[in-house]
Amino acid sequence: MPSVMGLLEERELAARQRVESLREEMDQLMAVLCDAEATWQRMVITRETVSEVLSGPGELDAVEASAGDARPAMPGPRPGKAERDIWQAISLLESVTDLLLRARLQAALILQLSGATLPAPDASGMRAGVVS
């Protein structure tokens, strides 16, 4: 009969592999999204440029005034991978319904972002300075 620890290690390995697979998939999707945003931004600029050229001199102000807020918003600068990862982690945290688990995950995220580490457990399995 397999040991409990062995079963837990197998499940942990499977979960880690799933996370790594999802991260790879997310990176691929982010690359596709960045390309799509760049294409969208070029189309908006192209449309505005064509509108300016076709409106002729002096008519540009009237065209812009009639467009008002109807023009689609230009995508802003895209965040870097680290910033995207942080926002994704935060949005995933919001979906966690178990309050204790959410608190632990938030604490882990804060530790990760701050660069802090937890003290290593001693021989009894307790962390130094931690009172239970």
Image (cartoon, rainbow, N blue to C red):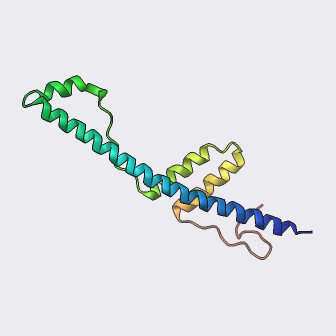
- Relative side of 26 to 65, left or right: right
Percent across and percent down for residue 101 are 70, 50
- Relative side of 45 to 57, left or right: right
Quadrant of residue 81 within the rendered picture:
bottom left
- Relative side of 32 to 124, left or right: left
Which residue is farthest right? 1
Percent across and percent down for residue 21 are 60, 60
At x 66% / y 63%, what residue is drawn?
Answer: 16
Is residue 76 visible to the viewer in this orientation of the structure?
A: no
Quadrant (top left/top right/bottom left/bottom right) for the C terminus = bottom right
Mark count: 0
At x 69% / y 60%, what residue is drawn?
Answer: 15
Percent across and percent down for residue 29 are 49, 52
Quadrant of residue 46 within the rendered picture:
top left
Residue placed most toward the observer, 13 or 119? 13
User: Is residue 16 depicted above or below 78 in this figure?
Assistant: below
Is residue 69 visible to the viewer in this orientation of the structure?
A: yes
At x 14% / y 31%, what residue is drawn?
Answer: 54
Quadrant (top left/top right/bottom left/bottom right) for the N terminus = bottom right
Percent across and percent down for residue 92 are 59, 47
User: Is residue 19 depicted above or below 118 in this figure?
Assistant: above
Which residue is farthest left? 57
At x 56% / y 62%, what residue is drawn?
Answer: 112
